[in-house]
Amino acid sequence: MFLFNFPDRPIDTFEHGSFPKIKRISHSFDNPNWHFALHVHPELIELIYVAGGTATIVVGQQAFRVQQGDILLIDRGIAHSITSYPDDPSDIWTLS
């Protein structure tokens, strides 16, 4: 798994703070047992891109099977988790 947390930047880096700021990028791949437990981002929106493989993403209390090419946007404050399929390991990028 690759994870990069961006350092905080002053608000004046962007025009009146009106543009989104990427706080974290992660990439999980080639791990048939990969699982990111149920969690919530109280102040962040998460963009999830499935570059390959298959996974189950639970949003709230609903489970979705996702595969290559799927894109999800998880709003702040929504509980979610991701679990790779063992027989088709996922390749997932997330931006928060």
Image (spheres, helix red, strand yellow):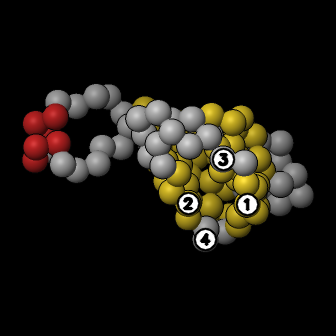
Determine which residue is flagged by label 3.
60
Q: Foreground mark, 3 or 1?
A: 3
User: Dividing the image into 4 quarters, which one contains the C terminus?
Assistant: top left
Q: Foreground mark, 4 or 1?
A: 1
Q: Is residue 55 above or below residue 9?
A: below
Relative to 80, 32 lies left or right: right
Do labels 4 and 1 touch, CB within 8 Å?
A: no
Q: Foreground mark, 2 or 4?
A: 2
Where disc 1 sits, the SS reads strand
The picture places residue 55, in percent across and down from the top left corner, at 75, 56
Name the residue at 75% across, 40% down. Answer: 35
Q: Earlier in the sequence, mark 2 or mark 3?
A: 3
Where disc 2 sits, the SS reads strand
Do labels 2 and 1 touch, CB within 8 Å?
A: yes
Q: Residues within 10 Å of mark 2 (few under 14, many from 20)?
A: few
Relative to 10, 8 lies left or right: right
- Residue 22 can be seen in this image: yes
Relative to 75, 62 lies left or right: right
Q: Amino acid at mark 3?
A: Gly
Determine which residue is flagged by label 2.
72
